[in-house]
Amino acid sequence: MRPHEIRPRLLLGPGPSPVSERVLAALARPTVGHLDPQLLALMDEIQEGLRRVFGTTNPMTFALSATGSAGMEAALANVLEPGDGAVIGVNGVFGGRLAEMARRLGARVVEVEAPWGEAIPEERFLDAVRRLP
């Protein structure tokens, strides 16, 4: 099998995205096992940084190695129970995806819709919360 040469490209989509030389160099280093004390210490540092970013002291703060959609689903799965109400703004693909995920988890979803990319006024959300069955 011969090596495959992939020419550099400027990626402008939501992901994957261009990777800096510093990151490429880090990826070329030896792999560390998921239970290695060095990796566990690094993950502790990352968790602490995430807590600062999100302004929380919650010890259950995690970084996910996943797509944004997987992160959305993980968040919903941890806050919704079957039968819970969920008010979700739908003004693009991701709002629609979030609403569908909530439905699959058994939530009673009320969608607050607007044309793609248009902001949804706060009052429309408040009205939807009042209408939740």
Image (cartoon, rainbow, N blue to C red):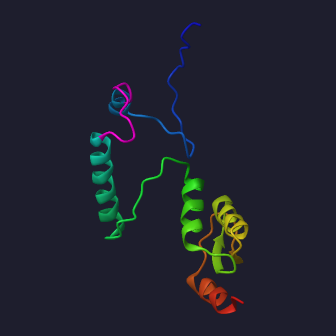
**On screen, residue 26 above or below 120:** above
Magenta region: 27-36
Q: Is residue 29 magenta?
A: yes
Is 7 drawn above or below residue 133 in the view shown? above
> Percent position (x, y) of residue 8?
50, 24
Q: Is residue 110 visible?
A: no
Q: Where does the image place residue 34, in percent across and percent down from the top left?
A: 39, 40
Which quarter of the picture shows residue 97?
A: bottom right
Q: Residue at x 56, y 61 (%)?
A: 74
Magenta span dominant secondary structure: loop
Query: In x, y percent, where is residue 43?
Result: 33, 49
Task: Identify the residue shown where x is 68% and y is 59%.
Answer: 93
Front position in the image: 30 or 111: 30
Q: Quadrant of the C terminus?
A: bottom right
* 52 relative position to 89: left or right: left
Q: Is residue 103 visible?
A: yes
Q: Quadrant of the N terminus?
A: top right
**Front residue of 118 and 110:** 110
Where does the image place residue 40, in percent across and percent down from the top left? 31, 46
Please tell me which residue is depicted at 30% across the width and 57% down the height of the picture.
Answer: 49
Up/down of 41 relative to 1, above or below: below
Residue 92 is a magenta residue: no
